[in-house]
């Protein structure tokens, strides 16, 4: 039952609006927090220097190989590609000082031990659909190593699919990469085809292919792939 309204007349003062609340502001950084942040940046810089090519002021392929060794991962491990994604590295096989500083500061990793932990966290992070799509797109673009390059060769595409999406859609990746390696019509994979494979994995039932309609806007390579799968299925059941 709602409370009864008071019969007393309210004063003008009670009808006035309460003073507006002041905007919430972050507390100023304390000397201790500033010192901690400064130490973190210093350790990130020291970590960079331990792997960087001194003349290039970059971590080059040799430095990345050493980093992989200290992290206990292969250079083909998805976690190294995740690191490049988080650093927003522009050139394959190289991390600039700015990329390293910005990326490691974002993921709060100033030691190898912390970086190893954060990379495992990133594997979980990309399970979120929006973040995986961003990572999946980045992985393709990261492999465009030449100016104005828009496609990747078949061998690179197959290896990349295995690293990036193989753990989620093993059967689809195995079949598609098998098809790519035996067909002779396509020498490269473009961005539209790359994105469409992710859509194929998410939308088309596999291996029965329910939901696939060649009249829809699929790149021709998928029509050919589906025809190959159907023919292969007929031969195996004959």
Image (spheres, rainbow, N blue to C red):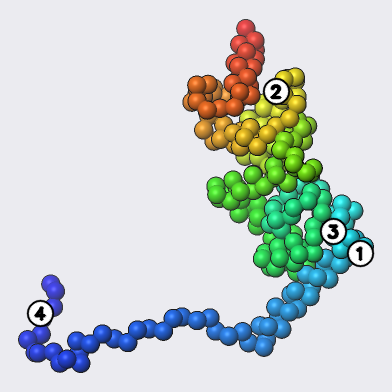
Task: Residue at 78% x, 51% y: name it.
Answer: 91
Is disc 4 placed on a helix, strand or loop? Answer: loop
Q: Residue 59 carries which label?
A: 3
Q: Which of marks 3 and 2 is nearer the N terminus?
A: 3
Tell which tag, 1 or 4, sits nearer the viewer.
Answer: 1
Q: Nearer the viewer, residue 111 or 18?
A: 18
- CA gap, disc 4 to disc 3? 73 Å
Find residue 139 and report its image quarter: top right
Is disc 3 placed on a helix, strand or loop? Answer: strand
Residue labelled with disc 2: 179
Is disc 2 placed on a helix, strand or loop? Answer: helix
Residue 150: tell me if it is visible. yes
- Report crowding for label 4: few under 14, some 14 to 19, many 20 or more residues within 10 A (C-alpha): few
Residue labelled with disc 1: 54
Residue labelled with disc 4: 4
Q: In which quarter of the image is the N terminus?
A: bottom left
Question: Is residue 53 found left or right of 81 in the rendered image?
Answer: right
Q: Which of marks 4 and 2 is nearer the N terminus?
A: 4
Tell which tag, 4 or 2, sits nearer the viewer.
Answer: 2
Find residue 95 and report its image quarter: bottom right
- CA gap, disc 3 to disc 1? 9 Å
Asked whether the residues under the numbered discs 1 and 4 touch, taking CB atoms below 8 Å apart as contact, a structural biologist would say no
Residue 43 in the image: state x and y as whole percent: 79, 73
Tell which tag, 3 or 2, sits nearer the viewer.
Answer: 3
Task: Residue at 82% x, 67% y: name it.
Answer: 47
- CA gap, disc 4 to disc 2? 77 Å
Looking at the rendered structure, the number of numbered marks drawn on it comes to 4
Asked whether the residues under the numbered discs 3 and 1 touch, taking CB atoms below 8 Å apart as contact, a structural biologist would say no
């Amino acid at each position: 039952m709602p409370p009864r309204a008071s019969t007393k007349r309210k004063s003008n003062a009670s009808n006035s609006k309460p003073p507006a609340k002041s905007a919430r502001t972050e507390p100023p950084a304390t000397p201790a927090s500033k010192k901690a942040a400064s130490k973190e940046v210093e350790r990130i810089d020291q970590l960079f220097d331990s792997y960087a090519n001194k003349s290039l002021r970059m971590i080059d392929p040799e430095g990345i190989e050493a980093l992989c060794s200290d992290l206990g991962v292969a250079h083909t491990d998805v976690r190294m590609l995740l690191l490049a994604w988080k650093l927003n590295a522009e050139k394959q096989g190289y991390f600039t000082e700015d990329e390293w500083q910005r990326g490691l500061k974002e993921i709060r990793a100033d030691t190898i031990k912390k970086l190893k932990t954060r990379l495992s966290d990133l594997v979980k992070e990309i399970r979120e659909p929006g973040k995986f799509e961003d990572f999946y797109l980045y992985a393709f673009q990261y492999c465009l190593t030449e100016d104005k390059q828009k496609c990747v060769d078949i061998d690179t595409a197959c290896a990349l699919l295995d690293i990036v999406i193989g753990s989620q859609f093993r059967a689809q990746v195995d079949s598609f990469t098998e098809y790519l390696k035996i067909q002779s019509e396509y020498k490269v994979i473009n961005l539209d085809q790359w994105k469409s494979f992710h859509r194929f994995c998410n939308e088309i039932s596999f291996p029965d292919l329910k939901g696939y309609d060649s009249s829809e806007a699929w790149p021709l390579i998928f029509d050919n792939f589906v025809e190959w799968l159907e023919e292969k299925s007929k031969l195996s059941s004959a």
